[in-house]
Image (cartoon, coloured by chain):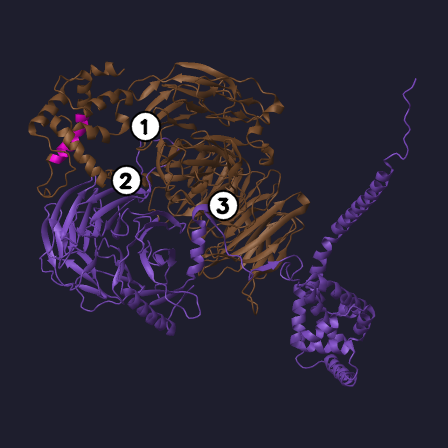
Chain colours: A purple, B brown
Amino acid sequence: MSTPSGGQEGAVLGERATEMASDGGSSSLQLPCVFSPKSRQYLAVCAQDGRLRIWNTDSKTINQEYVPSAHLSATCTCIAWGPCRTVKEGPQRKKRKSEAVQVEEKADLLAMGTAAGSVLLYSTAKGTLHCSLVTHSAGVNCVHWHPEDSVLYSGSDDTNIVEWDLQSGKMRSKWKADRAAVTSLCVSPDGKLLLSAGHVIKMWDLDTKELYRKFTGHSTAVTTLRFATTRPPDSNGLYFVSGAAHDRLISVWQVREDGKDKNSVVSFTLTDEPRHVDLVPSNSKEEAVRLAVVCQDGQLHLFEHFLNGPCKKPFSPSCSVQMADTRESPMPIPMLAAVLGRDSRSVLLAYGNHLQPVIEQVEVNTTERHVCLSRDVKTSLSLTMESTVSKVKTPVVNTKSKVLVPGLPGHQAPLKGSHLEKASEKRKKDTKEMSIAEQLGEIDLSATSSEKVKASLQTDNYAVLLVQGLESNDADILNKVLQTRKEMVIKKTVARLPLSAVLPLVKELTNRLQGHPFAGILMVRWLKAVLMHHTSYLASLPDLVTELGVLYHMIESRVKMFHKLTKLHGKLYLLMTHVATSDSSNMVSEVDHTAKLVYEDGEWD
Amino acid sequence: MVEHGDVRVVHKGGSKINFREPALSTDSRFLLCASGESVKVFSTATEECLHALQGHTDLITGVLLRPSNHLQAYSCSLDGTVRLWDFTDGILIRTYSIGYPIYGIYASAKHEGVIFIITPMHTDTNSELFQLVAVHLPQCGEQLVEAKELSAVLSNISSNPAASAFGREVRIFRSKPLQLEHVQKIVSFCVGALFVYNGPHNIFFCVSIVICSDQSISGTPSDQWTDPDWLLQAEGSGTNLLSGGVESVLVQWRYNQESQRDFLPRLGGAITHISVSPDGALFCTSHSDNKITIIQSCVKVSAVIQGLVKGDRIRTDLMIEPRSKALVLNGKPGHLQFYSLQRDKLLYNLDIVQQEYIHESGLEQFEVVMAAFDASGSWLATVEERKQKAPELELNLKLWAFDDQKQSFVLNTTISAPHEGRITALCFPHVSDGQTTMLVSTSRDGHFKAWQLAAPAHTEGPSWSCDFLGAYHSLVPECCCFSADSSLLAVGFQEVVTVWTPASWELLTTLSQPPGAVRDLCFGRLSCSKYLLGATTSRLLCCWNLLTCSLEWVTSMDVSLLLADPLSENMAAFCFEAGSTDLFVFKPGEPRPLFSHKALCSGRVTHAVFVPREVMLESCDEASQWLNCSHLYFLTQSMDLLTFITKAEEDKLTASSKQLVVSDDVAMTPFHLLLGKHRDQLENPQGSNVSLPQLLQMPAHVLPSASFLCSMFVQSLLISVNKPRSKEEEMESEKEEEDSDGEMESRISRPEHMPSGESGCAAPALTKEEVRELRRLKKLDHSWMKGLLD
């Protein structure tokens, strides 16, 4: 249900969002929330309670929960998913005809940096800690996997970058990167360059561990670094993006051949500081870079841009997505993370709170600049919690759903003889002016109404009341009249009824028959009377079939069971009488059982 | 005709995991279960499949932990081999070739080097008699070993005994044949052992013979179980007993405390196996609905490993949910299951009937028999049916709307008794964008009904009602199909195909090709949308041109399923021919088939589906071009889910695969540091033993048996008085050094950025002389040692 919030709603939401951000901003705790690479099977979230939770994005349920041994003191500061593992192949693998290809892309390991300075590797397949790496003396700010080798980089508050060899689980090298804390890291897609951010952004050659470039521009701590292109650095085509704390911008930097790359070339404007950035890098000049940024205020901004040299003017997002709940005065729902799908429209979103995020694949209408989605977070939450173990989802069944039983209108096709209908339509068109018959009818009606004026003195004239009730559709009057049980009254009333009121009466009766079965008993008497007195009139109606089709279907379907019911009734009656008679006979026989008088033979011979 | 050169048929998930009793590892971390031709190793904590142990070439019939080494497991298969695996790393250690099909495997800790297998009594395959055979496994280091030393233990047993046990005594008895009325009652349990009872005819083995009659398990079992087909399993110490059966209630009985029982009800399908981990911390139950439930010893479900639920038969078609691209079919009774094909994992079951299912044989309950999604996935129509007797059929048609706000399906309309007869087909029109407002259902009562989404009434939202009721000469409609643009509806009334226009519900034309009733109808797509294809029971596939209303072509083939790819013009016809199914993929407008595959599988294929790909392939190869837009999945008669894969795709997948090796050590607890220091002190004076930690780190499968190592291990821990090493020791160290060689090299070639503050846990570096000495040792000829090993 995506509605473009082109008006006030968006503005109101925006205000609320900023309010909320100022509330939540005081804690300024960056809780990591990362989707697994490639197939996006998992979402790893570290919530306020220090536990790591892995959510399954397919079933939208919690997959596992891990409590690090020192989760309260050494809270998790950053999470990075390792490259996808492949299922190990056995030593002697013969490719048979029907053997499945066992190359699945499953995310397995994830690295967590903690405030205590350790790096934990957690295996989602086994659900246990894989190994822990300790060498930093202060909190780890960022971890980043090498795209190909089993090498991990971590940057810490102690201003060092450590390169870990995961094959042996040992540190491979460690160097001082900056005077200030290392806040962000990124390895280039070809695995040869490393970006680190401290006071300045530095680019390192990973083979020699030498400084390759320096970029200055951000005044606050850089929180995000991402490579935007996959081209080699000496082609003027390597770009990367950066975002910093308290900075409502994403800057794009170009790594130029001549080394004159001091300032950012392009910038994207945001509504708040960036919290989660996802990027689809471009492989060639003709391909645009797609960027999805979730801000501190809970909004999602989508950008699409062809990186081609500097541009002075900052770009605004091609599409902004907000989310609101379904209450009367909608409150914004903060987004936690977003990843872009294969096509430009689909985005996988995580929103809500960190303890129970809701995951959803959304098709965003990118032609709109602002999109507001309304979601009922509470119901989806309760659903996910129930189905964690049982794997059963219960669809919502509420009273709003309609039940069609045989006999109700809509269960059978409305009867419409097509030619008849056309004829009647024609007739209606023809008689735009009043025909003589209708004029006569008018006169008749007026006559009856004049009678009615006289008759209104008699209060118990049901026929008049009924006509009034049918004309005004007054439920009170109709109830009063139709609830009578006296056979004679019904007969007389129906007999006195003017012909024009017969059809409305039949329709009213049909409606009431569909209700409670007790009401049906009363209505049937009326119906019987109507049919007895006015069959000839009804038969003369040209559109009888359409008018009385519903009634016909109802009678038909209700009578269908009548035969079986009478059979059952008969059998039950037989059974009951049998039981009753056997009961009574038992009573009789019991009385007679004991002998009244017993003679015993004497024992003499 | 194009041959199927580089397109292969492959298994794609959905295999059975409840076929045989699963095995839990000693530390309760892993669960091994036989699944088709591979053994799957699951993590009990995360329900993830860690490895699939592949190597067997036929159905696997048993998995068992090796009693003498809890890191290894045996598996046996109908291919006549027993294989020994290292299941933590997923490595095949040894293959024992027996030569007869094996139907079960047992082992006992008391019988070292012996396993017990179940093989047929006679060599002919269809014999019903089986025997238990003891096999002496030869000890040698080769990969493939022939085990020919067989001795029969028991004869006349079933191929799959319901339970088995070894007693404390290491004798195996064949008990007296039991009287039949006895068999119903005697299912007994004694300390540490279990009596086995299997089926109406026989038995099996019973051990330290204390046969208790059923009275000892508190009362008569019949008040708990109505079906005699139930299972027992003793737990760990033998003081507890678990039982379960068709009612899917797990009961934990305590020895000598008859009133105390723990119940775990509503586990799902009937329990088919119960197994207990050696430490008693976990139980697991296999269920008939292809599920393994892992239960903690406090009788609480901790995890559910759910395969594709296949039940006894599949009532609904295979469908793809347009939103999540999940495969949808009926699963547990009364549920629709959503199965992710990419991940080979069940996503969830959607409860359609919403009535508690009562597990009792002979009880008829509502089941989902038909379902359909519209093109955008916003509507789901389901038909549920309860059949007591044919004339008293109970039917419900439910229409569910997907609510974006609640992210769930919401019931919109329930239509009870939509038809008087069974519904034969259910079909939404293919509206590409915009709202679906129509549904057509055909029934055996000779009518088809068009249901329309009516405009919202004053208070309620929109709901569905019947718009049109169609019939044709009181013939029974069997199938229906909308054309690609939904402007035409074709309904097959036995021999006659009627074509209607949904806009005004007029009968446009009738087509027929007698004799033989029309079984399947399908409109062409895209450029072929003027064609209508029909398969008849008289082995004909007809193609009508709707512009000329004439028959375009006819071929003679017994089509069991006709399917159109939603993204291309291609159509797939599964034909039943001489006991097996052939596949033809063709375009209706072209005379030559694009692809044909003879003898796909045995039996009829009645369920198949085209699954749109996420990324289109750009294959130009003629034979595999039809797979560019979609995958084709189909279910065989034996309920295997199969699909096609092209060579190019396979190559791409294998090329992208790479290993990520990360050492697994959760070290660095204070205790470890302490211990590490202590060890350093112990070992460094000796100077010889870098090998000990490496010995501990080495994978188990490269080591000799534990008994062999133990003495050396103890010796290495002792403070040695310098004395000449024994031969064995030498050999051992050589072995380790070989292993450590690679690591040493990496250490030497380390970059110059050697950290200054490296922690003390690293092993002390070797001196140059030591390295040289090791190299020299490595070069020596050690072939004489083979004799020792044997």
Foreground of the two, A283 or B771:
B771
Q: Are marks 3 and 1 on the same chain?
A: yes
Q: Nearer the viewer, residue A63 or A151?
A: A63
- Dot 3 amino acid type: Leu
Q: Which residue is mark 2?
A: B657
In this view, the mark in front (2 or 1): 1
At label 2, the amino acid type is Ser
Is tag 3's residue or tag 1's residue first in the polypeptide sequence? 1
> A560 above or below B765?
below
Q: Residue at x 31, y 42 (%)?
A: A128
Provide the residue designation for mark 1. Answer: B92
What whole-number distance in Å separates the C-alpha atoms at marks 2 and 1? 21 Å
| Marks 3 & 1, CB-CB < 8 Å contact | no
The boundaries of the magenta stretch are B736-747
Image coords of residue B790 (percent x, y):
27, 15
- Camera-side residue: B244 or A262? B244
